[in-house]
Amino acid sequence: MPADARTWLVLPTYNEADNLEAIVAAVREHLPADRRVLVVDDGSPDGTGGLADRLAGEHGDVEVLHRARKEGLGPAYVAGFARALAGGAELVAQMDADFSHDPADLPRLLAAVEGADLVLGSRYVAGGGVADWGAIRRLISRGGSAYSRLLLGVGVADLTGGFKVFRRPVLEAIDLPTIPALGYAFQVETTYRAVRLGFRVVEVPIVFRDRRVGESKMSGSIVVEAALRVPAMRLSRRRR
Ligand SMILES: Nc1nc2c(ncn2[C@@H]2O[C@H](COP(=O)(O)OP(=O)(O)OP(=O)(O)O)[C@@H](O)[C@H]2O)c(=O)[nH]1
Ligand SMILES: [Mg+2]
């Protein structure tokens, strides 16, 4: 097992064979030297896992976590974060592997976490935005964030985004294994729990673009999950 690293990036993949090599190269370029890139692959049928193994063989700072089957983004992140913490991570970044999140934004997010506990790459603060999206998807995303903000009563503009950097104590405090969400709701819940626990959350503007290549996995069911899960988060807080 290689030496511990301070900054870990968790990169979940499902059928990202056409993106993986380029995204790994790009993030390695923009992360500090004391880094580890963890690819979490859910048995992608397109061979992403094997490709990731090859990259891990070539680069000492790349590691792969293979999971048997596709279980959704949430469980993949829970497993990846646990591995990063076990590997000594002080900072844990997360982003999509399809170039929707720009690897060149990583230094700005990492700089911001020097003065925060959780940094969110945010589409909905000044300077942030979404390229490429049509009216419907914009509406779903904006509406989802507004809905969550209203229901949860937190002052975070972009609750559903997946480009973030956590300080270690946040991941240790938010009780990851008890987050049941699979899709966007997972992103909402990690941020919501951090806010509730009093951690400092800072939003940094980013522009989100459509995936460069590969098939979209956006589905109605994860939107519905988020719509139902958000009020459940609010209720479980009352119960606690
Ligand atoms: N390990 C793992 N990764 C996943 C799973 N679902 C999605 N991902 C990865 O999570 C990231 C975000 O998922 P996307 O499919 O890009 O979701 P999206 O951006 O909402 O939708 P599209 O880009 O339109 O497909 C990508 O890197 C995916 O490969 C999963 O079940 N397991
Ligand atoms: Mg995507």
Image (cartoon, rainbow, N blue to C red):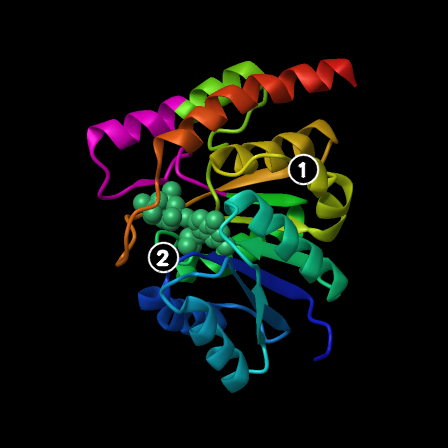
Find numbered disc 2 in the image and state the secondary structure of the residue it sits on.
loop
Q: Nearer the viewer, mark 1 or mark 2?
A: 2
Give the residue furthest to the bottom: 58
Residue at (24% x, 27% y) in the render = 136
Please say whether residue 124 is one of the residues in the magenta stretch.
yes
The image position of residue 161, as x and y in percent, is 46, 39
Label ID, residue 98: 2
The image position of residue 47, as x and y in percent, is 39, 69
**61 relative to 124, above or below:** below
Relative horizontal placement of residue 142, taking residue 66 as reference (left or right): left
Is residue 95 in sight in this rendering?
no
Quick one: 131 or 40, which is closer to the camera?
40
The image position of residue 173, as x and y in percent, is 77, 41
The image position of residue 29, as x and y in percent, is 46, 73
**41 relative to 137, above or below:** below
Is residue 80 in sight in this rendering?
yes
Q: Is mark 2 within 8 Å of ligand 2?
A: yes
Where, quadrant-wise, is the N terminus in this rendering? bottom right
Please say whether residue 37 is one of the residues in the magenta stretch.
no
Label ID, residue 200: 1
Image: magenta residue range: 121-143
Tag 1: residue type?
Arg
Relative horizontal placement of residue 160, taking residue 186 as reference (left or right): left
Tag 2: residue type?
Asp
Residue at (41% x, 58% y) in the render = 97
Relative horizontal placement of residue 189, taking residue 216 as reference (left or right): right
Residue at (35% x, 40% y) in the render = 218
**236 relative to 220, above or below:** above
Q: Residues within 10 Å of mark 2 (few under 14, many from 20)?
A: many
* Alpha-carbon span between mark 1 and mark 2: 28 Å
